Amino acid sequence: MNKQFENYFLKALYNAKIEQITQTYKEKGFSFRANVKIDDIQFDVIVQTPDKAIAFDIQVSPSQEKLKGVKKRHEKAKALGYNFRVVKINKPINPTIAIDWLNQALFKYLVNHPPEVIRSQPYHAHYSQVKTYINSVEINGLNAGVQVDGGIYVDFQCGNDEEHLISETFPFEGEVSLNLLKQEVKNAKLNIDDSHYY
């Protein structure tokens, strides 16, 4: 699955599938390696014994992966003398949960309560937008707790040059507390993934 994950949930499904494959084959006496790159081809998992090796390609259904990419991995595995397996992860289809004012409310909250990873940057930050994906909602009277993931889109201004901006996206997951009557964010506990940021 050589593409950015849509969200933390898909990444968790992917990691769980790798764990399942490696555990299953470990019990059969296989050794394993995850995310193996051989020349210009990457396999998600390779399990092997002295007599047998199997390369796995893990994909989320419905997959946007072109058949050509899968075929190249299959041919590489065959050339190495490996068996090849494509494993599909079926993405659960859930009813869409929408709060039409959440993105704007969280945007306003983050402008007033900037996360440490953004606040600590040496450049002035202009928040561009916030996008959220709601995983669950728990409503208690006029308040709600919402489990979300999404992205914070920020432009960093370098020096005094207003036209020299560096655009960054910070993925996050966490819980947001809402006041439903005022349509505002009371509190946000977000785990921000800054591993891509240098």
Image: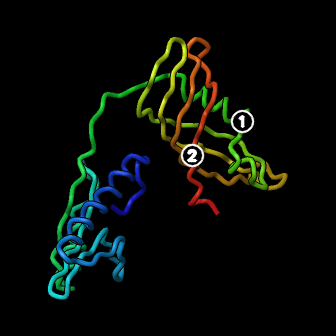
Drawn side of residue 90 relative to residue 187, left or right: left
Where is residue 85 shown, x and y percent of the image?
A: 17, 67
Q: Are marks 2 and 1 in contact (CB under 8 Å)?
A: no
Residue type for callout 2: Asn
Q: Residue furthest right?
A: 160
Give the residue displayed 33% in from the left and 51% down from the top: 13
On-image quarter of the N terminus? bottom left
Which class describes the residues within 10 Å of circle 1: few (<14), some (14-19), or many (20+)?
Answer: few
Where is residue 184 shown, x and y percent of the image?
A: 62, 21
Give the residue displayed 35% in from the left and 83% down from the top: 39
Where is residue 93 shown, x and y percent of the image?
A: 27, 36
Drawn side of residue 83 relative to residue 173, left or right: left
Q: Quadrant of residue 181?
A: top right
Drawn side of residue 113 relative to residue 150, left or right: right
Task: Please tell me which residue lies in front, 169 or 51.
Answer: 51
Give the residue displayed 41% in from the left and 48% down from the top: 6
Task: Please tell me which residue lies in front, 87 or 164.
Answer: 87
Residue behind mark 2: 191
* Residue 78 drawn above or below residue 191: below
Residue behind mark 1: 113
Give the residue displayed 75% in from the left and 52% down from the top: 120
Which element type, helix, strand or loop, lies under badge 1?
loop
Which element type, helix, strand or loop, lies under badge 2?
strand
